Structures are given as structure tokens and as C-alpha cells.
Amino acid sequence: MQKHRHLFLIGFMGSGKSYWGNKLSAVSGMPFIDLDDQITRQVGKTIPEIFLEQGENGFRILERNQLLQINTLESPTIIATGGGTPCFFDNLDIMKTWGITVYLKATQELLAARLFQQKTGRPLISDIDDPELEAYIQEKLDKRKPFYLKADVVLTQQNGSENLLTALIHVA
Ligand code: S3P
């Protein structure tokens, strides 16, 4: 990997950005950061608290500002973005300028299966009843896909496949 070339993991909630980012970091030695964790640390509030107090628009501005901080990192870093990060402002263009973007693609069925268990801490879906969740995911994914598909690399996930790590190592 070239100097100062970061690796941005993008994709829908539940696509495994943090999970795979951590795994790749462990095998590659590249540092890993999670954009949501950075926001939480900087603001001193959880993501649900930020949504509650500042709304989604306020969160998107904090997210954008945190993304801009990536440029100050000295060494190439793996960054797990939030599911909405590439879909606001010119965040995607910025990421593509500063590194390589990798879309962790997963089917709506796989995402739904995971997100049924992981609604807590995700304010966009925490109040959606299970029967409506799948339709919400489908609609949101359809809107976001045009952004995600502009990634430099698209990696499709099968259920829990370890091959994804091999593919990520190639990209890094
Ligand atoms: C969001 C995804 C979350 C977090 C926030 C909004 C989204 O991150 O940034 O709740 O808009 O999809 P994860 O993708 O890590 O869940």
C-alpha cells in the first residue's frame, strides 16, 4: 500500500465494517479506527444521544467533521465508516481522494438477519418494529446503493465467509 493511502470500509449498517476492519488490522498491522467511535469520543455522547439532541442533520455534520480529521493521520489506516457516511456531502469523493474505498456488499436478507439482533445503538432502526424492519432496509439500501457502488472495490459477502479477509488483504 502506498504511503498515506487509507482504506475506507463502506456499506450498510450490519455489513461488518468494524468486524472486518478489526480483522484486517490484526493481520496487516495497519491501525484501525471506527468513525462512529471517534465521534462518540469527541462529543462525549453516544450515537443515539447525538441523534436525540441534534437530529440526524446534526449527526451528519459531526460525522463530516470527523471524516475531515482523517487527513491528519500520519500512517495508512483502516477506517470503518458509518452506513450513511458516503451518502452525505462530498464525503465519498473525499474518501476516494485520500485512499481506497471498499464496499462490503451484503444481501438485504443477510443484513436483516443481522440487524434484527443489533437494533440497539442504531437510532435509525431502534424504534422500527421487526415486521417493518426488512422493508425499511430494502428502501434505504435502494437509496444508498448508487453511492456504495461508486466504491473503488466491491466485495460481496456470503454468510460469514472468511474469504472476505483474503480479498481485503489483497486490496490493502
Ligand atoms: C448510520 C449507521 C451507523 C451510525 C449511525 C447512522 C446510517 O453506523 O453511523 O447510526 O446512517 O446508516 P453503522 O453502519 O456502523 O451501524
Image (cartoon, grey):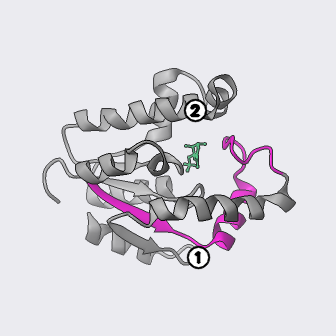
Residue 56 percent across, percent down from the top left: 61, 35
Q: Which numbered disc, 2 or 1, marks the residue closer to the eye?
A: 2
The magenta segment:
99-128
Location of residue 84 in the rendering, given as x and y in whole percent from the top left corner: 53, 48
Check the image and report above or below for 82 versus 26. above
The span from disc 2 to disc 1 (Cα, nearest Å) is 33 Å
Q: Is mark 1 within 8 Å of ligand 1?
A: no
Q: Which residue is mark 2?
A: 57
- Residue at position x 28%, y 68% in the image: 171
- Secondary structure beneath label 1: loop
Q: Is residue 91 above or below residue 148?
A: above
Tell me the SS state at disc 2. helix
The mark that comes first in sequence, 2 or 1, is 2
Q: Amino acid at mark 2?
A: Asn
Which of the image's four quarters has the C terminus?
Answer: bottom left
The reply to whether dot 2 and dot 1 touch (C-beta < 8 Å) is no
Q: To which quarter of the image does residue 136 belong? A: bottom right
Residue 138 appears left or right of 151: right
Depth order, front residue of 170/153: 153
Say whether residue 51 is left or right of residue 155.
right
Residue sitting at 85 percent across and 52 percent down? 129
What residue do we see at 65% from left, 29% from top? 55
Kindly identify the residue that appears in the image at 52 percent across and 29 percent down: 40
Outermost residue on the left side: it is 3
* Residue designated by label 1: 159
Q: Is residue 167 magenta?
A: no
Asked if ligand 1 lies within 8 A of label 2, the reply is no
Determine which quarter of the picture holds residue 1. bottom left
Any magenta on residue 113? yes
- Residue 139: x and y, percent? 68, 62
Residue 169 lies left or right of residue 120; in this view the side is left
In the image, residue 50 lies at what x, y percent? Answer: 61, 27
